[in-house]
Image (cartoon, grey):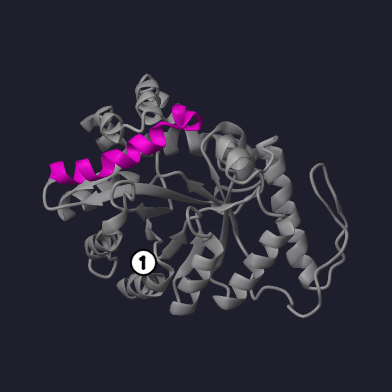
């Protein structure tokens, strides 16, 4: 099981964090699209490193033209000398419509076509004519001539929680990016099952898709403090109806109404109070360094790569400290 780590924060600090992760022996770095664009963060990480894989987890697929997405990915593949992984996600309906003024329609078929367009654009950089006439996109003019093809094939990983997107991953993606608000059981019994159906439909093998699962991970000097650090992140994710199946899977489905009611009142304390210790143990890896390392082994045999995610809700001013703690705890070169 490989270990990756999600990083972010101030752009002038990403390079130094990325170098430290590479020196510590982590398999991969993953950059999210929240307040900052995933692609610019990935560029900063790529320029600061030489060996580590660099991926977006995730870049938003729908607010951008797929041609622009493909061009940005090509540039990052060049900048990283072939180390770049294009991780894409749909985000939820409300965010697309009210934050990005983007129509949210038929997410799985639209994402499927975006994957096709990206690959066709990369082929067009190598000189192949492009004539894409699809349900959502029409691209009949190739890119300009000054760039050339990416140095290596660019893997496309997709984020997914529910059935149709999971099946799409099995049908045509190179990897699965599991949402941090998940559990080993959900990955094994739900995500992998639907991905397998997609693989069978497309006649592909399980080895064709990397299973990369993000994990909320809080490390502290004592178990109670670590759990407390993870609970705001779990509460934040739990307010989203799209993720209700993850709660239902473990019998916590009724919690979403309590979380949403507190969120509507901007009551973070009330949200955190709704997250029990059992939920924290289910949806996060927490504890002292020794405890956290032991708990991470729950993913062994279920995923190919775990992506450590420090809980950033309620901890924005301590982000650098959280990275240091994760690096010190899980650095592959010092952990057996």
Residue 111 pos. (x, y %) = 67, 45
Looking at the image, can residue 46 be seen?
yes
Q: Residue furthest top?
A: 254
What residue is disc 1 on? 26
Q: Residue furthest left?
A: 222
Relative to residue 46, is residue 277 drawn left or right? left
Residue 261 pos. (x, y %) = 38, 23
Secondary structure mainly formed by the magenta segment: helix
User: What quarter of the picture does the N terminus occupy?
Assistant: bottom left
Stretch in magenta: 223-244
User: What quarter of the picture does the C terminus occupy?
Assistant: bottom left
Relative to residue 54, is residue 295 drawn left or right? left
Residue 195 pos. (x, y %) = 56, 40
Q: Secondary structure at mark 1?
A: loop
- Magenta span includes 13: no
Residue 117 pos. (x, y %) = 75, 55
Relative to residue 98, is residue 231 drawn left or right? left
Taking the spot 56% from the left edge, 64% from the top edge, the residue there is 39
Q: Is 12 drawn above or below residue 316 in the view shown?
A: below
Relative to residue 174, is residue 33 drawn left or right? left
Q: Mark 1 packing: few (<14 Cα in 10 Å), some, or many (20+)?
A: many
Name the one closer to the observer, 29 or 233. 233
Taking the spot 64% from the left edge, 72% from the top edge, the residue there is 75
Looking at the image, can residue 49 be seen?
no
Taking the spot 52% from the left edge, 34% from the top edge, the residue there is 193
Q: Is 271 drawn above or below residue 224 in the view shown?
A: above
Quarter of the image where one finds residue 123 = bottom right
- Magenta span includes 232: yes
Quarter of the image where one finds residue 147 = bottom right
């Amino acid at each position: 099981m490989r270990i990756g780590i999600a990083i972010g924060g101030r752009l002038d600090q990403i390079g130094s964090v990325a170098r430290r992760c590479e020196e510590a022996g982590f398999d991969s770095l993953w950059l999210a699209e929240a307040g900052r664009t995933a692609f610019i963060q990935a560029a900063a990480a790529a320029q600061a490193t030489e060996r580590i894989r660099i991926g977006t987890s995730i870049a938003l697929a729908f607010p951008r033209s797929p041609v622009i997405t493909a061009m940005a990915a090509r540039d990052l593949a060049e900048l990283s000398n072939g180390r770049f992984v294009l991780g894409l996600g749909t985000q939820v309906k409300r965010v697309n419509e009210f934050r990005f003024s983007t129509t949210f329609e038929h997410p799985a078929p639209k994402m499927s076509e975006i994957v096709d367009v990206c690959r066709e654009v990369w082929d067009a950089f190598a000189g192949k004519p492009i004539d894409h006439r699809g349900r959502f996109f029409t691209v009949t003019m190739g890119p300009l001539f000054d760039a050339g093809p990416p140095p290596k094939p660019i893997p496309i990983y997709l984020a997914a929680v529910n059935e149709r997107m999971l099946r799409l991953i099995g049908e045509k993606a190179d990897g699965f990016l599991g949402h941090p608000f998940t559990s080993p059981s959900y990955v094994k019994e739900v995500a992998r099952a639907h991905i397998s159906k997609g693989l069978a439909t497309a006649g592909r093998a399980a080895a064709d898709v990397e299973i990369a699962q993000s994990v909320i991970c809080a490390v502290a000097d004592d178990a109670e403090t670590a759990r407390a650090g993870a609970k705001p992140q779990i509460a934040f994710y739990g307010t989203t109806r799209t993720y209700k199946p993850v709660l239902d899977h473990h019998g916590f489905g009724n919690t979403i109404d309590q979380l949403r009611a507190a969120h509507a009142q901007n009551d973070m304390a009330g949200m955190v109070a709704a997250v029990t210790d059992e939920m924290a143990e289910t949806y996060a890896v927490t504890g002292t360094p020794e405890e956290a390392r032991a708990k991470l082994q729950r993913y062994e045999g279920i995923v190919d790569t775990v992506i450590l995610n420090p809980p950033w809700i309620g901890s924005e001013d301590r982000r650098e400290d959280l990275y240091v703690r994760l690096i010190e705890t899980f650095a592959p070169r010092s952990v057996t």
